[in-house]
Structure formats: structure tokens, C-alpha cells
Image (cartoon, rainbow, N blue to C red):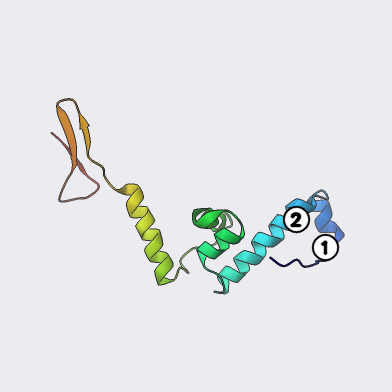
Amino acid sequence: MSTITVKIPEFILDVHHQQIETIKEVLQSGWVILEYLNGNLSIQECGDILNIGYRGFLELLWSKGIPIDALNEEELAEQMSQLRTRIEVKFVSFPNKSITPNPVVNSAMTVS
């Protein structure tokens, strides 16, 4: 990764109590978000650059109030796949009872 020099106004340093690492993180995440919004980086690339992963970058966008409806087709498919994996109903057996998915509605359960 390349290094650049940035002149920071004193009032920004004062707001962050002279904590250069905090300012560095804010600048880096801001730059990466800008590149994502301009279509130059994917969600995965942004997560990798910031060392927070795909989901971490989505959470960063959400925390900043940035909608993720700008997902391209591939990113949307990946997000849907991850969601399906999380909500997948697994068969669970209990003594004298078993829980199986209701074939009519995937999210409903039938206990027998």
C-alpha cells in the first residue's frame, strides 16, 4: 500500500484530541467509502483494504447511514447467498418430537 502525506487543519486535530491514529483510520475509511461509492472498489475489496471483511464493510456503511442498494449483481447474489445460509432451517430432533420445515412456507415450522 502506498503512503501519502496529508495536511490536517489544527481544528480537526483538536476535535480528535491530537490522536493521529484515529485521524488516519477516519481518513482511510472515508477514502475507501468514497472509492466504493464511485464504483472503483467492490464491497469485498473495501473490507479487505480496511481489514474488516465483507460483512464488516457493510456494517461500516450502515453505521454511516449509507444505503447498500448500490450493490452490483454479483455482490447482491453473494449477499443473498449469505442470508440464505444464515436462515436455513436445520432439522432438529428432540425426544419424541421432531421439527421439520413446513413445505408451504419456508420460515414456518411444524412440530410433530
Judging depth in this view, the residue of 109 and 91 nearest the camera is 91
Residue at the image point whose x is 82% and y is 63% from the top: 8
Q: Rounded to the nearest whole Å, what is the CA distance between mark 1 and mark 2? A: 9 Å
Residues at discs 1 and 2 in contact (Cβ within 8 Å):
yes
The type of residue carrying mark 2 is Ile
Who comes first in sequence, dot 1 or dot 2?
1
Exactly how many numbered labels are in the figure? 2
SS at circle 1: loop
Point out the residue furthest to the right here: 10
Q: Crowding at label 1, few (<14), some or many (≥20) Cα neighbours within 10 Å?
A: few
The type of residue carrying mark 1 is Ile
Residue at the image point whose x is 20% and y is 32% from the top: 93
Residue 111 location, x and y as percent? 16, 35
Residue 33 location, x and y as percent? 60, 65
Picture quarter with the C terminus: top left
- Pointer 1: what residue? 8
- Pointer 2: what residue? 23
- On the picture, is 20 further left or further right than 100? right
- On the picture, is 82 further left or further right than 97? right
